[in-house]
Image (tube, rainbow, N blue to C red):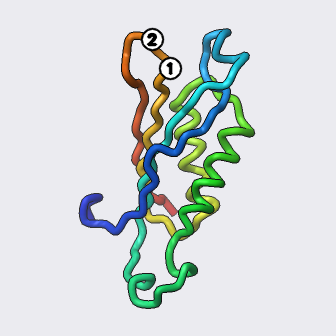
């Protein structure tokens, strides 16, 4: 099934102040990182039952992402993104796939934004 054909819950622009980066100034202070995440899984049952247990609690997802970010200090966005996706698959076992985009707007002073996107499908 193509990504565009899947049901998806998304969170956009989740702001987390954290320590991330390779430069000395980045290692001694927090900076904002914004997370966009798309969580792919069937939403058909939730659409019929109107029960939170049949879908994803996006508040719980946001809190889980924020907690992981605040309790880690990676140098690379690539490492942070991969760890966040692995964490989501572990914590929310019903996911079929995750697309995660990280924005680090203070990384380059003469650019509006920098970041990356990863897409991973469940392999088990």
Where disc 2 sits, the SS reads loop
How busy is the neighbourhood of tag 2: few (under 14 within 10 Å), some, or many (20 plus)? few
Query: Which residue corresponds to mark 1?
Result: 106
Question: Badges 2 and 1: C-beta atoms under 8 Å apart?
Answer: yes
| Viewer-nearest residue: 124 or 67 | 67
Residue pictured at 37% horizontal, 16% vertical: 111
Left or right relative to 24: residue 61: left
Name the mark on residue 60.
Answer: none
Q: Position of residue 31 (x, y in %)?
A: 61, 25
Query: Which residue corresponds to mark 2?
Result: 109
Q: Position of residue 4 (x, y in %)?
A: 25, 59
Left or right relative to 9: residue 23: right
Q: Is residue 120 visible?
A: no
Residue closest to the far bottom: 49
User: In the figure, 87 relative to 15: above or below?
Assistant: below
User: In the figure, 48 relative to 7: above or below?
Assistant: below
| Quarter residue 3 falls in | bottom left
């Amino acid at each position: 099934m193509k990504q565009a054909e899947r049901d998806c819950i998304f969170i956009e622009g989740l702001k987390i102040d954290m320590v991330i980066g390779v430069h000395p100034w980045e290692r001694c202070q927090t900076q904002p990182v914004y997370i966009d995440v798309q969580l792919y899984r069937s939403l058909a049952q939730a659409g019929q039952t109107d029960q939170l247990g049949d879908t994803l609690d996006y508040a719980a997802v946001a809190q889980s992402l924020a907690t992981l970010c605040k309790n880690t200090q990676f140098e690379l966005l690539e490492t942070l993104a991969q760890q966040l996706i692995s964490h989501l698959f572990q914590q929310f076992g019903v996911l079929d796939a995750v697309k995660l985009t990280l924005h680090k707007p203070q990384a380059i002073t003469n650019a509006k934004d920098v970041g990356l996107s990863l897409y991973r499908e469940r392999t088990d």
